[in-house]
Image (cartoon, grey):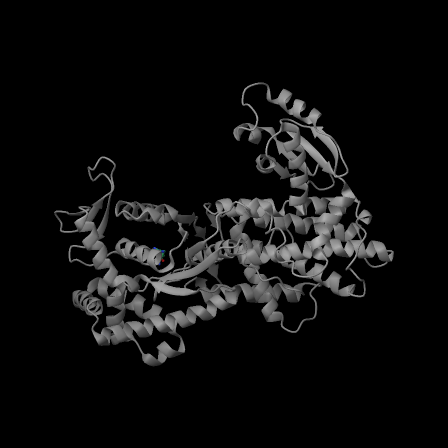
Amino acid sequence: MACFFRRRIAEQLGRTMQQREDVFIPALSAVPVFKKQQTADFRLSINVLRNNGVLPVSGDIQAQTEHLAHQLKQDSVVEEIAVGSAVINFRINCKLLAQKILEPFGTGDNSKFGLNSELFKFLKRGITVVEYSSPNIAKKFHAGHLRSTIIGNFIANLKQSLGNKVIRMNYLGDWGMQFGLLGVGFNQFGSQERLKQNPLQHLFEVYVKVNQEAEHNEDMRLAARDFFRQLEQHESQAVSLWQQFRDITVSEYQHVYKRLGVHFDVYSGESFHQERVQEVVQQLLQQGLLKTTEKGTGVVDLSAAGDMSTFSTVLRSDGTSLYITRDIAAAIDRSEKYSFDEMIYVTDKSQTNHFHQLFQILQALGHSWADRCHHVPFGLVQGMKTRSGEVVFLEDVLDEARARMLHNMKQSKTTKEMDDAEDTAQKVGISALIVQDFKGPLQSDYKFDWDKMLQAQGDTGVFLQYTHARLCSLIRANDNIDAATFNPSLLTEQSSVTILQHLLRYDEVLYQSAQDLQPKHLLNFLLKLCHLNASAHRDLPVKGSPQEVAQARLRLFSGSCLVLANGMRILGITPVDKM
Ligand code: ARG
């Protein structure tokens, strides 16, 4: 394992420089591999040592590098020490490399590979609330909600893998004036029967229709306002209709999320905090933070100079609450209920200012935990369409991904016979959606492209799944070979060494993703692993090789397969064994 070697090198550095070995760990990293090109295994960055105060910042850095390198000695683990530009490169004995890395893949539970690394030793663990997906009842489920769903799921998976207790929360848009319109609209154009048959579709239709109507119909607008007032005052008829809409929506969504491999521990929503909203307003008032404007709205001054150059409106002139008011109440409620160590909100970047203001108001109210709240913003998706046009429901995207993938699988010569082709097509189609989304920095916008994301070659979810299935099939085809023991000195070809060196980086890559919550580090690592395995498949045949060689190679492929599967699961992708 990577930490064994990192520790060994750090020990020697510690002895040589008479420092604690721990200070060298952050400066040591596994070297990224290049196809067909030999590289060192680890690299020590002199810059990091300078920044950490281990080495003086003054003086010629290259001279410092050479001076240190010359004091170090080769041994049975580190076979080569070489000076680079402000770095020292280390080469590990290659047999030992194979032995240590592939050791954990012999038997037992391997799901912890890379996760029990010492890199995570000082990571704070605790209770993490991740709020994601959060669609609005009766409104469109747009690409932003899909992104929030898969990104939030990834963050929750990652945090959980690293040993946090994670609370997965969906915060539905289930309150506000639109429910006045929806209530009135349903009484006029709705039907209980259609609501039962096709709930999301029907609610959306009613919502669109009532909005059109309300545009030129003053009575309709008044009725809507009145319906919402009834709701806010808990009048039973209004509430029971609203409750029905909400229940039906949640159960429909649960069904679709299941297809996507996503679940939630809590379905919260804007409606939950009505009493709390009043309390919040009182507190703002008592602490002198609430100002009333000429128009009669309630605002909080957020400017540094106290001149209202930036402010947030928290009350309408009729005294009703707004999106941010409900968010303030919701955050306070969560802090009391869950005593979280951190809370992460996942939405598109257009809400960056909203969350900034939310955290500022929470601070102003004296909630110091506000600095443990984070917003993870992401960019916009252009052109997410299905064959029938603009996407309104999540289900349509999943149906289309499945149908397109099924079609491609039928066309492909390599597709295997399988019992449930539809299920495989669905899993692979969803991987394609996820990989397309995770490849770049989350903040970037991107163009949704069915053809590109579903290509079998290139850096796609299909390629990830295909590689995993191929590795599984290799392992199945050789199940007569006993892989419990293996001889590590038989893995010295360049193709093997490159894979081993690449596996050395797994914990660092997880660490990077844990630091900035960007899935791209992990994803690009896995894609590279797939490319390396594709070459190794050619260069390192298992069938027909002498027993011992076959055994060692199988161990290497099994290790790759496991790391690939574990990494895919963290990304939110369910690996398929056959395709
Ligand atoms: N329902 C909102 C929307 O669709 C997203 C909610 C985000 N979370 C929050 N706590 N404000 O835009």
Q: Is residue 395 left or right of residue 36?
A: left
Number of numbered tags placed on the structure image: 0
Residue at figure coordinates x 57%, y 35% from the top left: 23
Residue at figure coordinates x 77%, y 64% from the top left: 477
Q: Is residue 450 visible?
A: no
Residue farthest along the left direction in this orientation: 294
Q: Of 151 and 552, which appears nearest the observer?
A: 552
- Picture coordinates of residue 410 (x, y %)? 65, 67
Q: Quadrant of ligand 1?
A: bottom left
Residue at figure coordinates x 54%, y 47% from the top left: 520
In the image, residue 20 above or below residue 66: below
- Picture coordinates of residue 239 (x, y %)? 25, 73
Q: Is residue 542 left or right of residue 259?
A: right
* The C terminus - image quarter: bottom right
- Picture coordinates of residue 462 (x, y %)? 61, 58
In the image, residue 184 above or below residue 165: below
In the image, residue 285 above or below residue 272: above
Residue at figure coordinates x 23%, y 73% from the top left: 238
Q: Residue 265 occupies which quadrant of the picture?
A: bottom left
Q: Is residue 435 left or right of residue 496?
A: left
Residue farthest along the right direction in this orientation: 546
Q: Residue 277 occupies which quadrant of the picture?
A: bottom left
In the image, residue 309 above or below residue 111: above
Q: Is residue 184 visible?
A: yes
